[in-house]
Structure formats: C-alpha cells, structure tokens
Amino acid sequence: MPQCQAAKKHQTQSSVASRCTVAYFRLMKNETHPPSPCIRTCAVSGRVGFCIGCGRKLAEIGGWTGFSAAQKQEVLDQLPARLELVRQSLAPSS
C-alpha cells in the first residue's frame, strides 16, 4: 500500500509539473505573437473590403490564429491605412 501512495504522489507531482510546463509555453507563445486587433465591432465594409472595427480582411480574420508572428505583424502594420480608408468610406458625402 505505501508503494501505491508513493506512486500516486509522484504521478500527481508529475501531472502538475506537466500542466505548469504547458501553461508556461502557451504564455511564452502568446508573448511572442502580436495580439488580435479585434475590438468586437465586426462588420466587413462592402466598399473597401475591410472590417470596420479592426481593418482586417475576412481571410485574415479567419486565419489569424494560424498566422506566424511575422504574418500577424505584417497585417498589423497595414491596419492604420486601412482603417483610414474605412473611415473615409463611411463618412457622409458632401
């Protein structure tokens, strides 16, 4: 019986260590990847083809979680200009 308890204790410690390691690597992965620019205002403008909230194209929104950090950064670098186009397209005509 003591051997079973010792094995169970070791298994529990090992399981906790494993979960901590997985959590650590997830945290590290998230720190190296830019966060999503989503602001929960999701509607793609038919005029310019970008989301009016974040400025991404539908394919970029759908593929975001699979993009590399470099791909995400490339999209993020384009967003200010895209959002300006969205803003202009939504402005009332004079």
Image: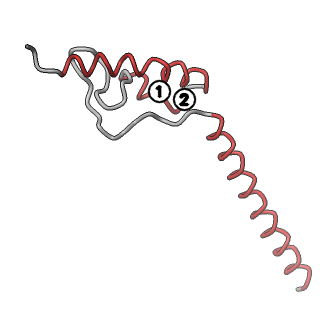
Q: Is residue 4 left or right of residue 87?
A: right
Q: Residue at x 29, y 16 (%)?
A: 85
Residue most extreme to the bottom = 1
Check the image and report above or below for 74 versus 1. Answer: above
Local crowd size for mark 2, using a 10 Å CA cut-off: few (<14), some (14–19), many (≥20): few
Closest to the observer, 10 or 20: 20
Q: Quadrant of the C terminus?
A: top left
Q: Amino acid at mark 1?
A: Gly
Query: Which label was assigned to residue 66?
Result: 2
The residue to which callout 1 is attached is 63
Check the image and report above or below for 13 versus 49. Answer: below
- Asked which secondary structure carries label 1, the reply is helix
Q: Residue at x 36, y 18 (%)?
A: 82
Q: Residue at x 45, y 17 (%)?
A: 78
- Asked which secondary structure carries label 2, the reply is helix
Residue most extreme to the left = 94
